[in-house]
Each structure stands twice: as structure tokens, then as C-alpha cells.
Image (cartoon, rainbow, N blue to C red):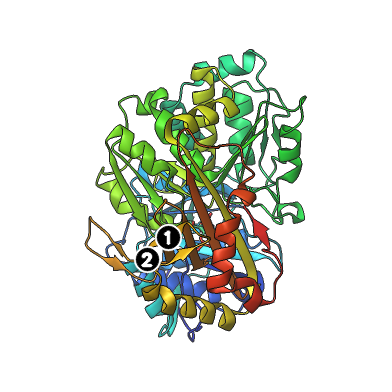
Amino acid sequence: MTAKTIETTPYSDQKPGTSGLRKRVPVFSQPNYVENFIQSIFDSLEGFGGQTLVIGGDGRFYNDVAIQKAIRIAAANGFGKVLVGQGGILSTPAASNIIRHYKAFGGLVLSASHNPGGPDGDFGIKYNVSNGGPAPERITDAVYARTQVIDSYKTLDTPDIDLNLIGTQQVGGMVVEVIDPVADYAALMQSLFDFDAIRALFVSGFRMTFDAMHAVTGPYAHAILEGMLGAPKGTVINGTPSPTFNNGHPDPNLVYCKEMHDLLMTPDGPDFGAASDGDGDRNLIIGKNRFVTPSDSLALLAANVHLAPGYKDGIAGIARSMPTSAAADRVAEKLGIEMHETPTGWKFFGNLLDAGRVTICGEESAGTGSSHVREKDGLWAVLLWLNILAVRKQGVDEIVREHWKIYGRNYYTRHDYEEVDAAIAGQLVDDLRAQLPGLPGKTFEDDLQVAFADDFTYHDPIDGSTSAKQGIRIGFTDGSRIVLRLSGTGTVGATLRLYLERYEAADGRHDLDTQLALEPLIGIAEALAGVKSRTGRDAPSVIT
Ligand code: G16
């Protein structure tokens, strides 16, 4: 069957953000919108003729439509094979694993992560390279440049393939293999963690609740937690993926998982609560009477990861995104291993992981992962926590407190101002940037002296590339920090993220309310940037 060439015209708004192209479904549904973007990806790559492409998504509305289009375009462009998850489902970390395991050329990950789905919700397309990780900026820049001049795409006139039928089908000269989305991922998890110890933990009466948020991790969590690890049925809640996430917001934070959080704070509640997001790469960890911030979770996992068989020989280094708290830095220092600070975006960890310079990575945005794949991995983090709990035979709260006793506590919060007027948000950031040269040496609130103030620039130590303007940092001599940046994942207006951090030493006060502990910094941030006054908001949209 010969490929058809269809004429098209460019869309001006196809610039990939922090994690691929994310837009509302009505935007993606415009004529040739998906086709233009996918063809632009393929036009920016070389050497994929006859190779394998992985396609998977989080099951959200429009997933099936986009997958059928992607398969036809891949066939018409000369890919030899497509591996696609049954029902079009592959969690983002599972897709990364499939790319690596089957030595695919790359993959299309169809998701808008934690953003709501549905006919008026969000959709997204991200390209991952052969290491299983998101394409680096040099590729996403090339894709965007191509979208601006594209005048045709290639496709085939073929019927839809049956995404529910495991096995191979033919599309033109290309083979499409529909695979079990869970099996390879579950085997990988079993190779990393002490499943016998976790099974024994459940046998001992340990109670857990895992909220799959009607999103992609449901089938994975049912199979691994309730199937392989013997957790009682009902441990996994909201475990059937729904195209609209049951009209919910699949973001595992204290706003959207409030019910579970409140349950964990009651005497009769479970011992452990966890959740993952739309595409399965984020995680939320709550112990009895203890929410663990993602930044603390990264530090705790790094300090204890040697308790899991897959990491028994220790770790090479840790990387965190710049806005993530410095809690993990203290662990790296104690272990005498490398520590790296990268811009926001999992793609920046890829080179460090490939080079073996780091083993564990994490972000304040509820993402933690390791060298086992090249994406953050929600269930991996949950299983590592379970492995640690099983071996240490202590509760989450006790483990967290012991950690603070050794390393000190980094009080940390993020204030998000969503759907802000983009022009106001941009101006606000520019104005703060203009103040930076005058800030070092200045003292606020009697004792908070500015040590440095800059707009973060990252120099990749592996490929020498430079990424500038990655967020404004104001650091104080006591280790406190204020960070302000514009989100790269929102789909409406601009989202301003204000990150606040204060360090309390090992023998310090570790029981303060987080927002109260950070009040002085919140006040300084408002005085310098004026987020509330200039956006007309009296409070953040979300506090995490
Ligand atoms: C994506 C990226 C993360 C990033 C997060 C928030 O996560 O993969 O690296 O930290 O967005 O980015 P921003 O602050 O620019 O909105 P996900 O889970 O949305 O794919």
C-alpha cells in the first residue's frame, strides 16, 4: 500500500513545554493538528526506517483517536513496527521501560499527566528517545521549528486496528503488536524490590490504601499490589482507568487526595496511603499522621534505597530539579556521592542517568525515579517505600523523624497561582529579574540576608549544552530560598509557581506548621515580586 501525502498548513502554537505538547482536546481536534505535530516529530529524526516505535497513553479522552492517527503516520513514514499497549494504555514509566527493553527507536507518550481529561479537558503528545526518556531540548526545538513550516504529512488509507486484541496486525508494510501493558513493568519491579518482605508486611496486618485516581496506574496497582504482593482486595481504589478520570483531577496532591489524607490522620486509618497521577509517573506518600513532601521523600528514599535488592550496592549520585528542596543534598554529602541541580523537567536527568553519574532523581512536583527507566515512576516510589517499611519495621512518621534528626529538616512549600493573565505573569517575572543584581547583601526580617540572587542557568556536564532562564532564585545565608518560575505545563493563561524553603538544623525545631515556619519568606516574596497584589489574587490556587 502506498503512502498518501496530504497537504497541510502550520499551526503557530505547537511549541513543546516542560513535558511535550499539552493543549485542550478541542485544540488537538482541529484538522491536521495531531498529524502536523507527529509528522514534525518524524521529520526531526533520522534513521528510523524499519525500526520500532512504542505508542502508549494514559487512556484519557482522545487517546484512541490519536493512537490510530499515529499508527498510520508511522507506517507511512517507514517505521517497521509499532508496539502499543492493549486498549492504548501504557503508563509513562511503563512506556519508558518498553522502549528500553525492546530496544525501540523511540516512543510517543500520549498524556497530559495530572491535568483533567474529557472532551473539554487536556491532551498531550510527547516524544521519547531510545534511552526511554523525554526528547532533549535540541530535538523539541527542532520539532517546533518544523511545525512552523510544515506543508504536508504522510499517512495511509487503512481501517483502525483493534487495540484490544493482543497480538500482531498489519498496517501497510508495518507490523503493529498490541502488548500487555503491565507484564514487563511488573517484572521490572520484581527485579528491583524485595517482594517477599513486602508480602510478609501485608501478611502481618499492615494496611494500605492506593488511590489510582481512575487513571492509568489502576491495572498496574491491582496486578502488583493486590496480585503479586498479596495486599487485600480493596487496597487499590479508583482502579479502573476512565477517559475523563471519572470527571476528576488526577493530580496526587493534598487538594485532590484530601479524603485519603484525612483518613490517614485518624487513629483507625490505614498505615500507609499513596496515589499516582493520570499517566502514572507522579506519586503521593502519606504515612499515619505524616504527609511526606516530595522533596523529603527524595531525600529519604536516597538515604534508604540500599535496603532494596536492586540498589544494594549503593547509588552513584542524586539529581534534583532546581526548585526541589535541598534535603537530598545533605544525604548526598553524607554518602560522599555526586549531587546535581537541574532545571525543571525530567528530560534534564537523562544525560546524567545515561552516564551513570546519578542513580536517583526527584522533583518537588511529586516525581521520583531512578536509573531503571528514564521517566519518573509513581509506583516505583510506592514500592520502594513499602520495601523500606518492610525492612526497617518502622512506621513512616518514625522514619521521617529519625531522618530529620540526622540531617535537619527543610521546611518546604509551593504556592501556585493558576490561570493568571500571561502578560501580567511575564511582566512580574521580568520585574523581579531586574531587581536581582541589587539583592545580594540585603537583609530582610532582621536576620535573613540574601547570599545570591540569579536566574538559574544549567550547564549540562555531559553534553555541554546550556539552558538559561530556568527560574529566579533568591538564596539566603541560612540556606533559605525563594524561587519563582512560570510553569511549562499549563494550558490556559500562565501558572506562577512560588517555591519557599527554610532549613532547620539537625537539633532544631522540627514540629512547626509548614506555612507558619515559612511565613517570613512568604512575606519577603510578596514584597519583592507582588504576586498577590499584581494578579489581584488573595491566595494561591493550590498550596502543596
Ligand atoms: C512535568 C515534568 C516535570 C515537571 C512538572 C511540572 O511533569 O515532567 O519534570 O516538574 O511537569 O512542570 P512545570 O512546573 O513546568 O509545570 P508531569 O507529571 O506533568 O509530566
Residue 382 left/right relative to 541: left
**Residue farthest to the front, as pictured:** 446
Q: Is residue 120 above or below residue 372?
A: below
* Image spot of residue 201 (x, y percent): 59, 17
Residue 474 left/right relative to 528: left
Q: Residue 107 or 406: which is nearer the viewer?
A: 406
| Residue topped by disc 1 | 449
| Residue topped by disc 2 | 441
Q: Earlier in the sequence, mark 2 or mark 1?
A: 2
Q: Residue at x 69, y 22 (%)?
A: 232
Quarter holding the N terminus?
bottom left
Secondary structure of the residue carrying tag 2 is loop
Compute the Cα span from label 2 to label 1. Answer: 6 Å
Q: Residue at x 42, y 79 (%)?
A: 434
| Local crowd size for mark 2, using a 10 Å CA cut-off: few (<14), some (14–19), many (≥20) | some
Q: Amino acid at mark 2?
A: Gly
Secondary structure of the residue carrying tag 1 is strand
> What mark, if any, has residue 524 been given in the picture?
none
Q: Amino acid at mark 1?
A: Gln
* Image spot of residue 317 (x, y percent): 31, 40
Q: Is residue 312 above or below residue 421?
A: above
